[in-house]
């Protein structure tokens, strides 16, 4: 809770980033990709130290054209990145040519109790100036009582030369702790880019 002044009156406002402003965002791991890799995994340090984990994707450039960024997790003691996910996925886009623009739900991007990888972006181009950036929040992954919610947002320069803003809301439908997360493209390698994992300090 923060107090701000407006027209000489004190009003209270909830500041979503208050924890970050006070030093609550703690960098844990940086995965830097400089030569193609099939996936980028975070296999340690996702534990009860933090209630929330933030992953930032910075200029991920795919080897293949028209592929999309995706995510999956492993429950503690699990393997194979095949946890059950239910999700919702929608996009906003605008072609560079101005020929088309829309805001729409994308049924091809959601999962209904699926064990595949969850889409986080639309089709990313692999031209020299094309990539995808964004973030994913994973909430309370060490809980053994509740399912594990996550939300993601990406900005993509698509293979058809237009910006696409993608939104994902989902949960791992397990009460087991999630302690590993993997990101990869739907096909081919990630040629370059950076993924950072942060822990958000408890209040």
Image: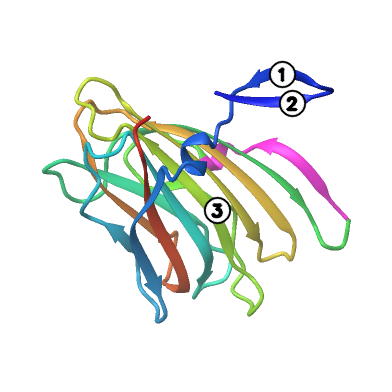
Q: Closer to the N terminus: mark 3 or mark 2?
A: 2
Report the residue marked by disc 1: 10
Q: Work out whether 157 lies above or below 117.
A: below
* Circle 3 residues within 10 Å: few <14, some 14–19, many ≥20: many
Span shown in magenta: 99-109
User: Residue 109, position in %: x, y?
Assistant: 53, 42
Q: Work out whether 10 lies above or below 124.
A: above
Callouts 1 and 3 close, C-beta under 8 Å: no
Residue 132 appears in which quarter of the rendering? bottom right
Helix, strand or loop at mark 2: strand
Helix, strand or loop at mark 1: strand
Residue shown at 42% from the left, 61% from the top: 195
Report the residue marked by disc 3: 134
159 and 48: which one is in front?
48
* Circle 1 residues within 10 Å: few <14, some 14–19, many ≥20: few
Q: For the residues carrying marks 3 and 2, which lies nearer the camera in this image?
A: 2
């Amino acid at each position: 809770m923060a107090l701000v002044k407006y027209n000489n009156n004190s009003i209270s406002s909830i500041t979503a980033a208050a924890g970050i402003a006070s030093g609550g965002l703690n960098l844990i791991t940086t995965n830097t990709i400089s030569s193609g890799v099939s996936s980028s995994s975070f296999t340690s340090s996702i534990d009860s130290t933090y209630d929330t984990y933030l992953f930032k994707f910075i200029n991920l450039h795919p080897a293949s054209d028209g592929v999309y960024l995706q995510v999956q997790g492993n429950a503690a003691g699990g393997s194979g990145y095949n946890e059950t996910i239910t999700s919702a996925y929608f996009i906003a886009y605008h072609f560079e040519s101005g020929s088309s623009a829309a805001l729409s739900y994308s049924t091809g991007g959601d999962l209904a109790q699926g064990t595949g990888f969850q889409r986080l972006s639309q089709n990313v181009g692999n031209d020299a100036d094309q990539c995808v950036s964004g973030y994913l929040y994973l909430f309370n992954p060490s809980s053994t009582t509740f399912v594990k919610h996550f939300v993601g947002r990406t900005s993509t320069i698509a293979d058809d030369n237009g910006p696409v803003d993608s939104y994902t809301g989902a949960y791992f439908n397990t009460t087991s702790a999630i302690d590993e997360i993997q990101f990869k493209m739907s096909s081919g390698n990630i040629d370059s880019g950076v993924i950072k994992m942060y822990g958000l300090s408890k209040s």
